[in-house]
Image: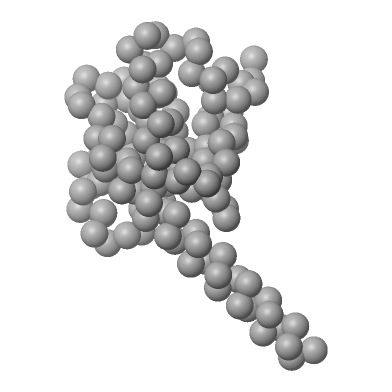
Amino acid sequence: MASKNIDDYIAPFSPKVRAILKKVRATVGKAAPRAEERISYGIPAFVLHGNLVYFAAFKNHIGFYPPVRDQKLKKAVAIYAGEKGNLRFPLDKPIPYALIGRIVKARVRENLENAGGKSKRKSRRRSRT
């Protein structure tokens, strides 16, 4: 059965994984307090002027799905890189919550810059007509 919200998504996991998921959620929420929570593609997502991040629990890791474009962060996330641009935080190692916060803040900046650029482009188009 599909989850209706993030609480529903987190509920069925083991206590250990639930605690991690709750802390990931809190970390993302703290880094992006204006972001909206939702379920997208069946997993928790945060949205602010577009998609910020998604996260999900798997048997051996927490998947984190941001497109990390920030050059300063690329080195830091390299050890967690999955095959398709996702990040994998192994459940048997400490979860890098501070890094998650930095990723989210970088994504907020990207989304706000992109949103500003879109509104400027729209206003330029309107002024030409």
Q: Position of residue 11 (x, y in %)?
A: 50, 13
On the question of residue 84 being in view, the answer is no
Using the image, determine if residue 6 lies above or below residue 34. Answer: above
**Picture quadrant where residue 62 is located:** top left
Q: Residue at x 54, y 25 (%)?
A: 6
Q: Quadrant of the C terminus?
A: bottom right
Using the image, determine if residue 87 lies above or below residue 9. Answer: below
Using the image, determine if residue 58 lies above or below residue 11. Answer: below
On the question of residue 112 being in view, the answer is yes
Q: Position of residue 92 (x, y in %)?
A: 22, 20
Q: Position of residue 16 (x, y in %)?
A: 33, 12
**Picture quadrant where residue 71 is located:** bottom left
Return the residue found at the far right: 129
Q: Residue at x 52, y 37 (%)?
A: 45
Q: Residue at x 53, y 30 (%)?
A: 43
In the rendered view, does 103 fall on the left or right side of 75?
Answer: right
Using the image, determine if residue 68 lies above or below residue 60. Answer: below
Q: Position of residue 24 (x, y in %)?
A: 38, 30
In the rendered view, does 116 fall on the left or right side of 24?
Answer: right
Return the residue found at the far bottom: 128
